[in-house]
Amino acid sequence: MNREKKLTKPVASFIVLTNIIFLPLFLLVGAISMLGFPTWIFDVMFCISSWSSTFAFAVLFKKIYPGQSFLQFVKDKFKDKLKISVLLIVSVIQTFIFLMILFVVSKNSEVDSIFTVSSWGMWHLPIWFTTGFVGIDLIKYIIFFMISIISIKIVMTAFYNLNQNLIIPIIIHQFFNFFIGIINGNLIDLIMYNAIFYLVVVVVLIVVNPKKALYGTK
């Protein structure tokens, strides 16, 4: 029986394969938009393209974890019982951030235009150079976007380590997408507010380090 050879550089392989999968999907999304297909087809393909990293992980799984079952690996990530306290803290933090952003945006917007129905609710990974921003606006967008993403990843890591159930980071990610997607405002401003508030949360988490969730030996 042939055993799968373990990758010596799994991270590099993962990044390369993710981009190999993503590029044709991205071009397909562009073609769908240019050819005038229905919006729902564009939205579906856009979401599928955002799953490129998941597809890459599935393809490389046997080489990253030789001898392990992919399905069992996924099941193990959900086996720990969810802690209501962790769920409540996550919900309260993200709802508070959403309300703070809503309050700030409402100061500069008409009340009846604060919320919007948008395909952004399924948005997974903004593509910097398709936003239409150029020059300083593009630079600001990239900086705030990176701060937001790094901050939300640290938040995910902390609360996942407190519960060891993949449902926790999924909920955090979905709240992040959903809340930013239903506010109608300037994209750069929304990303900036998210970057600021999530960065504050990260600083608090790093200082408090609840149950050594981020660093130190438990």
Image (tube, rainbow, N blue to C red):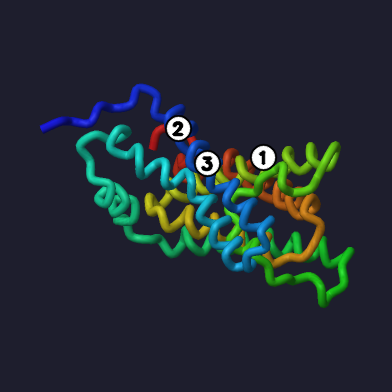
Residue 196 place in picture, x, y as percent: 73, 47
The residue drawn where x is 68% and y is 46% is 200
Whether pointer 3 and pointer 2 mark residues with C-beta atoms closer than 8 Å, the reply is yes
User: Which is nearer the eye, 138 or 200?
Assistant: 138
**Amino acid on which the number 2 mark rests in the picture:** Gly
CB under 8 Å between callouts 2 and 1?
Answer: no
Separation of marks 2 and 1 at Cα, in angstroms: 26 Å
Q: Of label 3 and label 2, which has the lower sequence position?
A: 3
Q: Secondary structure at mark 1?
A: helix
Mark 3 and mark 2: Cα distance apart in space: 9 Å
Q: Is residue 90 visible?
A: no
Specify the farthest residue to the bottom: 112
Which percent across, then down, holds residue 165? Answer: 38, 54
Of callouts 1 and 3, the N-terminal one? 1
Image position, residue 124 (x, y; %)? 58, 53
In this rendered view, identify the residue nearer to me: 183 or 60. Answer: 60
* Nearer to me, 175 or 155: 175
**Disc number for residue 209:** 3
The amino acid marked with disc number 3 is Asn
- The residue furthest front is 35
Residue 183 in sight: yes
Residue extending farthest top: 8
List the residue tagged with mark 1: 146
Contact (Cβ within 8 Å) of mark 1 with mark 3: no
Q: Is residue 11 left or right of residue 75?
A: right
Q: Earlier in the sequence, mark 2 or mark 1?
A: 1
Please identify, in this view, whether the residue under mark 1 or under mark 3 is nearer the observer.
1
Residue 173, quarter of picture: bottom right
State the residue position of label 2.
216
